[in-house]
Image (cartoon, helix red, strand yellow):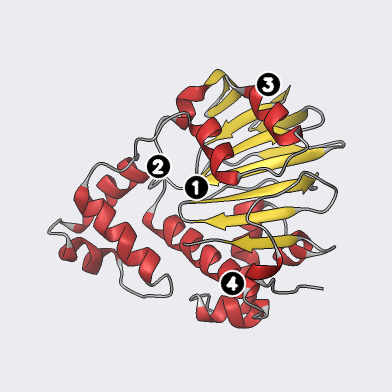
Amino acid sequence: MITGMDRAALPETCCPGEVATIWIRSGYAAYLGPSLRLDPHSGSVHCVAVGIDAPFTVRVAADQRTVRSAFIPARTRHQVVVDSGRMLFCYLEPTLLSGVERCTTETLGAIGLTHRHESALIDQMRQANPLDPAALLRRIADTDTPAITDARIRATVRTIRADPAGTLGATALATDVGLSTSRFLHLFSAQTGTSLRRYRLWSRMMRVAAAVEQGHDLTTAASDAGFASPSHFSDSFHTMFGLTATTLLANGTRLIVGPT
């Protein structure tokens, strides 16, 4: 059963355990919990994956590698295969921090492998005290420099975040910041590492999560966030995360939404 969560009922930190926890914050989202049987998928934003209890296998194209941590760039089709143990998936908006891709020491195609703070990350996740997701983010990113340096793209991102259900197309958004459509789309991709369409989908997903946490059902939340139909939402979610939203939120998963 999918339920909304009362913000006052849960702390904004998380103790590692068998019940999964999802945090949603401004600029990032994270999952910590039992392994998920993910299908091949392609995320809308960058993702850092960490095997808390055991290694996992990451597959891209015809190659695969078994590791404890990986950086998966946005729009990279891949599959994460986990036999057992807990996983951390941290999804990072380019609006937040830069340089995460430089924190890995090996590569598998476009994917970075073995975070240089891997051991510290795992230890941090295993500690008995409640885990502060903001502290985790600092460890993962190892920088406080925003990735987006162009003020025009920052303005566009603010517009999309403020109204994820909005229907302004690329031409209108480009005009708003004084760029041609082609130049705008190229600059947006270069600055964010993802496409305008995929970033808008991501922003809509974050709006859905906030609505579900407040007690709305998925169908209503998805419609209000701008998804054309329940199947549009379901297909987009599966494409982005490799499983259905119903599967993710089942079995008592805790959803904790902070300022977005």
- Kindly identify the amino acid type of the residue bearing the numbered disc 4: His
Look at the numbered discs 4 and 3 and tell me whether their residues touch, using CB distance below 8 Å: no
Residue located at (48% from left, 76% from top): 226
Residue located at (74% from left, 59% from top): 248
Look at the numbered discs 2 and 1 and tell me whether their residues touch, using CB distance below 8 Å: yes
Q: Quadrant of residue 70?
A: top right
The mark that comes first in sequence, 3 or 2, is 3
Left or right: residue 125 versus residue 188 is: right
Badge 3: how crowded within 10 Å, few (<14), some, or many (20+)? some
Give the spatial CA distance, label 2 vs label 1: 8 Å
Q: Position of residue 3 (x, y in %)?
A: 74, 74
Q: Position of residue 55 (x, y in %)?
A: 78, 27
The numbered dot on residue 232 is 4
Label 4: element kind: helix
Query: Which-is-in-front pick, marks 3 and 1?
Result: 3
The numbered dot on residue 45 is 1
Label 1: element kind: loop
Left or right: residue 200 versus residue 80 is: left
Which residue position holds label 2?
Answer: 193
- The one nearer the camera, 60 or 241, is 241
Q: Quadrant of residue 109?
A: top right
Residue located at (55% from left, 81% from top): 223
- Kindly identify the amino acid type of the residue bearing the numbered disc 3: Ser
Badge 4: how crowded within 10 Å, few (<14), some, or many (20+)? few
Q: Is residue 139 above or below residue 179?
A: above
- The one nearer the camera, 142 or 240, is 142
Q: Is residue 111 above or below residue 195?
A: above
The mark that comes first in sequence, 4 or 1, is 1
- Kindly identify the amino acid type of the residue bearing the numbered disc 2: Gly
Label 2: element kind: loop
Q: Position of residue 82 (x, y in %)?
A: 81, 37
